[in-house]
Image (cartoon, coloured by chain):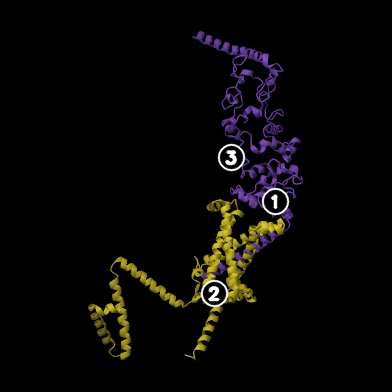
Amino acid sequence: MRGKFLAAGIFIALGVVAQGFWTPADAKVSLEKCTICHGKPEFRKILVDGKIRDLFATEDSLKGSVHEKKTCVDCHFDVSEIPHRQRPKRVTCTHCHYKGNAEGAPQSDAYLEYFGSVHGKAIAKGNTKAPLCQDCHGSHAIFKVKDPGSHVSRLSVAETCGRCHIEIYAQYKTSIHGVALARGITEAPACTGCHGEHKIYDHKDPKSSVYATHVAEQCSTCHASVLIMSKFGIEAEQVATYQNSFHGVASGFGSRTVANCASCHGIHDIRPPEDPLSMVNPKNVPTTCGKCHPGANPNFALGKMHVDSHSKESGIIYYTALFFKYLTIGTMLALIAHIFLDMYGRTRRLRGE
Amino acid sequence: MSMNDKKDPKRQTLEQEIKTTVDEETAGLDPSEAGKIREKVRARVLEEVERERRIRTAKERREEERRRREEKRRERLHEEGETFERFNRNFRFQHIVMFTSVIILIVTGMPIKFPEFVLSRFLVGFWGGIHNSTLVHRIGAVMLIYFMVHHLLYTVFSRRGRRDLVLLIPTPKDARDAVQNVRHFLGKTEEKPRFGRFSYIEKFDYWAVYWGCVIMIGSGLFLWFEGIVLKYFPKYILDVALEMHSDEAMLATMAIVIWHFYNVHFNPDRFPGTLMWWHGRISEHEMKEEHPLEYEEIMAKREKQEGAEGPGR
């Protein structure tokens, strides 16, 4: 009985050790085989549209990346013949990246959000230009988001998105957010700051974080924070004053035609008001307001836009509010006092005093 | 009833019976006096008999009770004396237009001032979104403007309107009345101030509506036609108009809900409210109580008229 157990134990131990021994050797073999061709720097393919597909990949390709310990066929598992009879398929990341995987990939279901996103839906519809995971995260050089070398790091994600969204990238690059980020101010948002990471939706989709009625909320995640805004000398009250204005109230009640932050300040081309190209530069205000209020003239720019009737800087508006405040308090106090005196008198007479 | 009585043979024997009994009792009296007594007794007995006849079933009894209540009410009304027309039909119409428009304006306006309030979302949703809500607000605005124009024309071209306007002008007496009223509330004096057609309270209400209408319609029109306004005025004028519109709305709403509702609804004399806004009539009792000077004036005028007509008759 005991002998049987021992034998089984030895057998299992051998198996474990053998696996430990053989796997690297196996990987080595695979890598060596692949680099016979892929290791040559000039190994590339000219495609029908004239583009060149670089097929160069060596041992170093994965070095330092999150997949450092993986080998070619771990991802390109459909490659079984050399030379390949068929063109190898694109790598499917979800083979390992799902919650509950045993491969050592992060336990996350974040990829699920991708399938509902505008990109995932485009792929499902058969749009070959829409991005898969590797189009944003990189194919061999995949690093953690915090790593500055990553394609999706705070500082480089805009460039990654800009590979397809070229015009928007150009606008963003010269906008206040783009310039600030380029200067290394990490509080400034890149694309993902507003649009989200995996769950990017079309701006006409009510689920989108930049849907007309969600824009104010999205901007306010940073712009309502005194902590962030005070660093750059921007007023954090702008959010509250917008929300109290008719535009803000109507937007809160679900109006999609009323102005949100982006309607006046621009979408990707947000610039500071001093910038002559800014949509909210006093010179451009008539044009900006004129988008909704036909015939807007320079009078639109006279006076503060984000008016707070409680702050003294609002001038005449502040004094109007002050006048009405005391008028209301005075009148109501007198009227309520009269009511109570009347009731007091009635009570007295009822008691027969 | 009398027709039936004569036809009914039973009734005739009854009458005969009454006659003999009363004649016996009043034998020693003057014939005319006796006749009067006989008539009274006859009426009383007939009424009693009639009532007995009618109360046969529960349903009939209920009807009877209602009839008696009605009679009682009529008697009391008679005690209170005649009623006077306080507000004519034109004025009542103006008031109805005004309060309808004000209710519409408050219901569609307040959600914009207090978007976070629980009811706001419901009130906006009731009209089908903010766009419709603002549309309804403009309908209310048109009604209020119509009321204002109607009232101005009324005060200019109607004799009653002109007379009322003159009576609504505040006078030193109003200040004295107010002081005396407060002293009366506090029990310092037993005498209530004697009001004319409009007490200082009513004068305040009237001019408060005037002020409110001017501010609300003025600033409201600015906000409605913001495109035209901005052609001639800078933007901050529009912001001032917005601030005025919002603040005066609050003041007006509070004045209506607290002050006006107390005076005409929650005041123990009036609770839960009179129908004067509908029929415009005031009883003699109320007239003597609340507008003694006007009452005296009417009485004096009537006496003078009767005196003038007297010799002719």
Does label 3 lie on the same chain as label 1?
yes
Residue A188 at x, y percent in the picture: 71, 38
Measuring from the top left, give residue B8's x and y in whole percent.
Answer: 24, 77
Identify the chain drawn in yellow.
B
Residue A282: x %, y % from top left: 74, 50
Q: CA distance from mark 1 to mark 2?
A: 52 Å
Is the same chain shared between marks 1 and 2? Answer: no
Identify the colour of chain A in the image. purple
Give the residue at mark 1: A306
Q: Are marks 1 and 3 in contact (CB under 8 Å)?
A: no
Helix, strand or loop at disc 3? loop
- Report which residue position mark 3 lands on: A207
Local crowd size for mark 2, using a 10 Å CA cut-off: few (<14), some (14–19), many (≥20): some
Where does label 2 land, which residue?
Answer: B290
Q: Circle 2 marks a residue in which chain? A: B
* Alpha carbon separation for disc pair 1 and 3: 28 Å
Looking at the image, residue A76 lies above or below residue B246: above
